[in-house]
Image (cartoon, coloured by chain):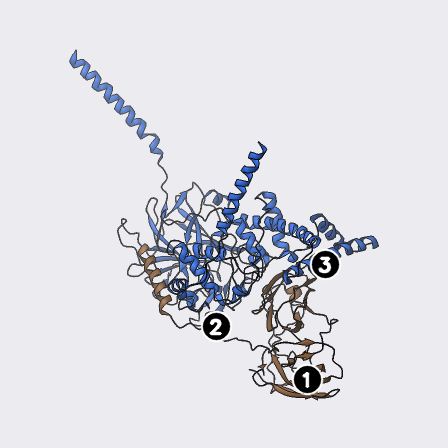
Chain colours: A blue, B brown
């Protein structure tokens, strides 16, 4: 029995080992084939010399990677280490969400992708020179997701200073966010942690953990190596005790000595961490000390990864594309104001926004990703609640050099002036109208309590309506998110306004500006037309007619039967 | 609707492919590098000489730019801060110039007693220029009660980017293997913080003080190329000064620099 168990175990282990080997694959020797594939598929952005300066690079942000420095963002290896070949292969295969790097799984064969890995490694000599394989981040001891773990992680998020760039609730709106640049001097924004679908290396907990421990090379995101942690080298209990001591106004002699011991222990652990980086081999006892210290660090890091994971929804909200009707819900009585809890009962519609690139000035590097919308209406009015993430609160203090217009955050909601009759009837041009005019609600951060009504027949032909004041507005900016509430009567006197009626499908589109990103005029993010409808109230007559018809039919049947019976008789 | 999106996408791609003249921005701000000897043997030096001098700025110095403090004002804005890329003192004395021997292959060892520290105090690095021997550990101090991140933009050695939280008073950094310099030091959290360092293979490096003075001591007698580097004024590595120092003697070499 026992031998069989052992055999089974060996089999399982053997299998596991094979699987692991298969996963951590190495690239082949660099060849002409790799060069060929690279020049055909990669050089447009990354340049023939791998400097990230291909012909398409100019308009891209984040910029294509410069391979000549050996700095790779997405690694399964420790800080300062080169990536594994598998890391490079995975990025080529999957791509980098939130950037211009596509996945090549369907357009390049597995062999070709490995050839490319081998070839891009030739751009940096460090790959050839390194004698030892890169040190991988140890993923053992993962702490699974729980509310308690998230709570612990939340504390670390503040303690370690994540909040400086990523902001209070993770929307990438930290106070340091506007001044960040990458290794090459290009502006860069911290990740919006509530949008895990934009994480370059993926949004799963392991990926978050690896970015945190290993840092994101070439970006301002530091590596949280062990000794970046408070009280590195102490156990959780010791750290707690030291914090107690440090918070005392005055320490007794005994307490002084106690804390001194802790400091010595920490210094020793830091010393070992540095020895390790410098390539000085640790003795078995030293290794044990170091491992013990790192165990605490890794535990904390898993809690932090769980917290970051908790900030984003499980999945990207379903886009309104393909399911593109924004339905306003009927309410009896007054409509809820901006902060009313009634809004919580509605599911918001998610409208992705893309950079406007049809006419000058264009926006190739948008910072606003989407706008979420909810709506209620009653017998006389309609109310909308718009929310969108913007890392910076820009209110027009600075002006754009070319247009002279103030740089400020803004949102515009666009309808046609006249609803097209039928699904095939033409809609106005999606970009500020054209031959057919559009009716716009234009909100600007410099006048946050006001929405201007505009009629436009194209971007250079927009007119602020003479009759204003039909819209009620509330707005607020908190923690990297705007919330805008707008209310209007369903019917107005103004002929230039859109008139609303339940059950009528109305085209709707959005534009948004991030002043800090240089958005002004047509340099903005926008959507094309979607559809909005005041969801008709299901008529109460549905409870009357069907039974009535049933009774009538039955009566008729019985009548017929009676007639037939009488005839037969 | 979808047609517009597709058209837009097609246009984007066209734009990308058409605009073919993209010059890498990084070339513009290229920093002139220090020149190091191929090898250096450290030993004891007896009867060495001294090379000293004063570095001055040519013409009238532009007014120092006041830095805009955008966060943690209570600590960072407690005292006024200026861009330290060009610090000119009395008599046009130029501070923060690295003056060094280019072609020394033998000489004294590093003074182990020298403290290798950069303090982050009031959200400013002090000193602004720090010399660090290859292999030695630089200690970053955090005297502020705010979070900093130490970002060292090495390209020959591995770049460093480590968080130094507000509770972490001292953070030693691992020694590096190769000589490299100058290397920029920044804090991404406080974007205005800037300093420079150099990882050097021999001890004949000096940084000018507020009087523009530098001194290289215990230099074995001989003739050397004397180099300088300054953040705003550039370097003379293309045409270094030639200085002869005699045993026990003092050679003087002054430099007058202008903006590059």
Count of marks placed on residues: 3
Say the numbered circle drawn on residue B90. Answer: 1
Locate the C terminus of chain A and report the quarter of the image it occupies.
top left
- In terms of depth relative to the viewer, which is nearer, A328 or A187? A187
Q: Report the mark closest to the observer, 3 or 1.
A: 3
**SS for callout 3:** helix
**Image location (x, y in percent) of residue A206:** 54, 50
Q: The disc numbered 3 marks a residue on which chain?
A: A
Locate the N terminus of chain A and report the quarter of the image it occupies.
top right
Q: The disc numbered 2 marks a residue on which chain?
A: B
**Image location (x, y in percent) of residue B90:** 68, 84
| Marks 2 & 3 on one chain | no
Which residue is labeled 3 in the image?
A267
Q: The disc numbered 1 marks a residue on which chain?
A: B
- Measure the alpha-carbon separation of dots 2 and 3: 42 Å
Q: Residue at x 75, y 87 (%)?
A: B248
Q: Residue at x 31, y 30 (%)?
A: A545
* Residue situated furthest right in the rendering: A253
**SS for callout 2:** helix
Would you say B18 lies left or right of A148 here? left
Is A347 located above or below residue B114 in the figure? Answer: above
* Residue B9 occupies quadrant: bottom left
Is A356 located above or below residue A156 in the figure? Answer: below
Q: Earlier in the sequence, mark 2 or mark 1?
A: 2
Which residue is labeled 2 in the image?
B25
CB of mark 3 within 8 Å of CB of mark 1?
no
């Amino acid at each position: 029995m026992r031998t069989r168990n052992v055999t089974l175990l060996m089999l399982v282990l053997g299998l596991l080992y094979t699987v692991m080997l298969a996963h951590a694959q190495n690239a082949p020797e660099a060849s002409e084939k790799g060069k060929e594939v690279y020049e055909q598929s990669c050089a447009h952005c990354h340049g023939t010399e791998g400097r990230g300066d291909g012909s398409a690079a100019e308009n891209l942000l984040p910029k294509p990677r410069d391979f000549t420095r050996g700095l790779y963002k997405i690694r399964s290896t420790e800080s300062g280490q080169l990536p594994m070949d598998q890391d490079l292969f995975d990025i080529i295969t999957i791509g980098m969400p939130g950037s211009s790097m596509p996945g090549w799984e369907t357009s390049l064969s597995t062999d070709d992708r490995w050839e490319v890995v081998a070839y891009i490694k030739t751009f940096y000599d460090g790959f050839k020179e390194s004698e030892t394989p890169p040190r991988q981040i140890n993923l053992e001891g993962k702490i699974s997701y729980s509310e308690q773990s998230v709570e612990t992680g939340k504390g670390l998020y503040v303690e370690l200073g994540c909040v400086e760039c990523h902001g209070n609730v993770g929307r990438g709106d930290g106070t340091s966010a506007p001044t960040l640049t990458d290794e090459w001097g290009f502006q860069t924004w911290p990740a919006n942690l509530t949008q895990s679908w934009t994480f370059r290396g993926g949004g799963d907990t392991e990926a978050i953990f690896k970015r945190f421990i290993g840092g994101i090379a070439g970006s301002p995101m530091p590596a949280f190596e062990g000794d970046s942690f408070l009280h590195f080298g102490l156990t959780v209990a010791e750290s707690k005790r030291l914090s107690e001591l440090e918070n005392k106004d005055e320490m007794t002699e005994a307490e002084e000595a106690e804390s001194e011991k802790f400091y010595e222990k920490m210094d020793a652990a830091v010393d070992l961490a540095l020895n390790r980086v410098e390539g000085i081999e640790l003795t078995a006892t030293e290794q044990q000390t170091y491992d013990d210290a790192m165990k605490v660090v890794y535990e904390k890091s898993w809690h932090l990864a769980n917290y970051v994971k908790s900030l984003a929804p499980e999945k990207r909200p379903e886009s309104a594309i393909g399911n593109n009707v924004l339905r306003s819900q009927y309410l009896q009585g007054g409509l809820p104001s901006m902060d009313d809890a009634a809004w919580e009962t509605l599911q918001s519609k998610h409208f992705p926004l893309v950079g406007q690139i049809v006419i000058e000035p264009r926006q190739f590097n948008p910072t606003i990703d989407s706008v979420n919308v909810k709506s209620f209406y009653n017998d006389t009015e309609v109310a909308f609640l718009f929310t969108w993430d913007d890392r910076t609160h820009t209110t027009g203090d600075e002006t754009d050099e070319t247009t002279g217009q103030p740089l400020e955050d803004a949102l515009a909601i666009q309808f046609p002036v006249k609803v097209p009759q039928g699904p095939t009837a033409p809609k106005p041009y999606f970009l500020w109208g054209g031959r057919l005019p559009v009716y716009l609600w234009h909100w600007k951060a410099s006048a946050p309590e006001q929405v201007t009504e505009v009629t436009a027949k194209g971007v250079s032909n927009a007119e602020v309506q003479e009759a204003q004041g039909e819209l009620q507005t509330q707005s607020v900016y908190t923690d990297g998110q705007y919330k805008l509430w707008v209310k209007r009567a369903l019917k107005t006197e103004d002929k230039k306004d859109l008139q609303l009626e339940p059950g009528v499908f109305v085209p709707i589109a959005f534009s948004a500006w991030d002043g800090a990103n240089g958005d002004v005029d047509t340099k903005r993010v926008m959507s094309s037309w979607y559809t909005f409808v005041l969801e008709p109230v299901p008529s109460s007559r549905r409870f009357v007619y069907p039974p009535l018809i049933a009774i009538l039919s039955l009566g008729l049947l019985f009548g017929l039967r009676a007639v037939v019976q009488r005839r037969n008789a | 609707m979808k047609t517009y999106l597709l058209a837009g996408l097609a246009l984007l791609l066209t734009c990308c492919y058409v605009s073919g003249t993209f010059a890498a921005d990084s070339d513009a701000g290229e920093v002139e590098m220090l020149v190091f000897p191929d090898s250096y043997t450290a030993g004891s030096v007896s009867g060495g000489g001294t090379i000293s001098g004063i570095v001055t700025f040519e013409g009238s110095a532009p007014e120092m730019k006041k830095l805009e403090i955008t966060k943690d004002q209570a600590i960072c804005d407690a005292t006024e801060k200026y861009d330290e890329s060009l610090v000119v003192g009395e008599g046009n004395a130029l501070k923060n110039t690295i003056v060094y021997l280019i072609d020394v292959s033998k000489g004294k060892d590093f003074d182990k007693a020298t403290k290798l520290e950069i303090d982050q105090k009031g959200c400013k690095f002090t000193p602004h220029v720090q010399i660090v021997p290859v292999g030695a550990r630089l200690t970053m101090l955090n005297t502020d009660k705010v979070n900093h991140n130490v970002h060292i933009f090495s390209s020959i050695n591995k770049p460093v980017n480590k968080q130094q939280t507000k509770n972490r008073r001292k953070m030693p950094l691992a020694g590096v293997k190769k000589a490299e310099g100058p290397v920029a030091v920044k804090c991404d959290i406080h974007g205005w913080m800037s300093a420079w360092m150099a990882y050097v293979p021999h001890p004949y490096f000096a940084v000018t003080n507020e009087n523009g003075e530098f001194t290289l001591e215990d230099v074995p007698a001989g003739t050397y190329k004397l180099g300088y580097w300054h953040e705003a004024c550039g370097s003379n590595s293309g045409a270094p000064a030639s200085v002869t120092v005699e045993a026990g003697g003092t050679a003087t070499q002054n430099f007058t620099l202008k903006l590059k």
